[in-house]
Amino acid sequence: MVSRVIPVDVFDLVIFGGTGDLARRKILPGLFRRFCAGQMQPEAQIIGAARAEMDSAEYREMVADAVREFSAEGSVGDEDLAQFVERLHYVPIDARGESGWSDLVSHMRPGVVHAFYFSVAPSLFGDLAERLNIHGLTNDASRIVVEKPFGRDLESARALNRDLAAYFDESQIYRIDHYLGKETVQNLMAVRFGNMLFEPLWNSQYVDHIQITVAETVGVGGRGDYYDKSGAMRDMVQNHLMQLLCLIAMEPPSKFDPDAVRDEKLKVIRALDKMDPHHIVRGQYEASDDGPSYREAVGDPRSRTESYVAMKVGVSNWRWAGTPFYLRTGKRLKARSSEITVVFKELNHSIFGEQEDHHNVLSIRLQPNEGITLGVTIKEPGPGGMRLIDVPLDMSFAQALGDDADAPPDAYERLIMDVIRGNQTLFMRGDEVEAAWAWTDPIIKGWEERGDVPKLYESGSDGPVDAVQMLARDTRVWRKVSP
């Protein structure tokens, strides 16, 4: 099954930080794939803007190298790549000065969508917004894309929102969280709201608990300086896991409309219970044969920053009161896996007598093998009476859609095209970000005031033993983390 690709409007896309790691690894290779898919009009143009001194020819060569390096082997055709880089230009620019801005203005065309991707440190967001305004680029056709971290607490998030709101309307600001661009995340909404099978059961009467896991096998690597000032709570829970929780727990919006969806997500964040310190486990990975410990990686033998967080979260509303949400994320774990698991309650009465517990389990895999699995109970084949076993009804996208199906777009590909379309459904709104920080800040402040020290855990394991014990107190277990 081959999907039909509808080209987006003609656009001028400026990537501030166009020579940086994110641009090279994700943004530019993603744009190349959208070009190959036929989603760009021939007149579309992309402008890299950064401090580095180079001309457009050198930039095209750099982008071509990046596309080859960060694309699947054999997926880059020389002719396609040559045509793609023809639409690229480069402008050396000073985000806080005047250098390069008149050159940038000369590249911008009237009558097309103007999108500005802030692939830079948040400290430059306000400066770039101000410069765009000074040089007349903040018009009705303008849209800006800003990357996380969007603040490091409520105060700084509010300040960033004020800086951007001084020059752009909320409808022009796209706060990107790449997890929301994943195919399976969007399928979560389709499964929930497009099937009579699930939505009537999607509440505390039928759901025992929900687990959200984002596990990584890598350590902090070269991000040690940033990560040690952030930690898993700021880097992952406040944004990625919070967004997944909102999509799982939100009420059906009145329609599939950006503000309708984000209104319901905001209600979930405001319904989150205040966190009990006994319902949180923080961890730091130890050294192994494969790499250094967390503290060695960040160069601070006394660091108290967490590389792992597990927590039991309550949502106090009519739908979810009494149903716990267990969240966990960490680095240097056994397997790379992102998964949402909905564990349904047992039957009130089993006609088959006393057998071991059987739960229907809906598993939504975000990575690495995107798909959805529903566990159902059947009779074990063969003689010997009515013995029950649990088996999966598995729908991996590759199998379900067939070998000739188009590969799902990368999250960045999808989200950038949504920016050009003017569709904000999968982007965070300013009040949503602030509400998430308002819930997160007291947790972090509590750790600092108590002087909490993260629990050490073995690299390549499932995380701290305390996280296992946290669920054991509720007579539950974590789902096995598997690739």
Image (cartoon, helix red, strand yellow):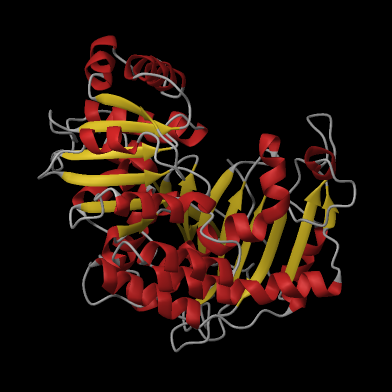
Q: Is residue 303 left or right of residue 86?
A: right
Choose top left, top right, bottom left or bottom right for residue 88.
top left
Give me the residue at 24% from left, 17% from top: 80
Frontmost residue, 89 versus 73: 89
Q: Where is residue 166 drawn, in percent x and y? A: 36, 66
Frontmost residue, 283 versus 78: 78
Q: Where is residue 158 drawn, in percent x and y? A: 50, 70
State whether residue 331 appears in this view.
no
Give me the residue at 37% from left, 28% from top: 29
State whether residue 103 appears in this view.
yes
Question: In this rendering, is residue 406 above or below 439?
Answer: above
Q: Where is residue 27 drawn, in percent x and y? A: 39, 35
Q: Where, quadrant-wise, is the C terminus in this rendering?
A: top right
Q: Residue furthest right?
A: 301
Q: Residue furthest bottom?
A: 318
Give me the residue at 23% from left, 67% from top: 256
Q: Residue furthest left?
A: 111
Question: In this rendering, is residue 279 above or below 145?
Answer: below
Choose top left, top right, bottom left or bottom right for residue 109.
top left
Q: Where is residue 18 drawn, in percent x and y? A: 41, 33
Give me the residue at 59% from left, 83% from top: 273
Q: Where, quadrant-wise, is the N terminus in this rendering?
A: top left
Frontmost residue, 478 versus 350: 478
Count how many numbered circles sit on residues in the image.
0
Q: Is residue 20 left or right of residue 354?
A: left
Q: Residue furthest top?
A: 78
Q: Is residue 323 left or right of residue 126?
A: right
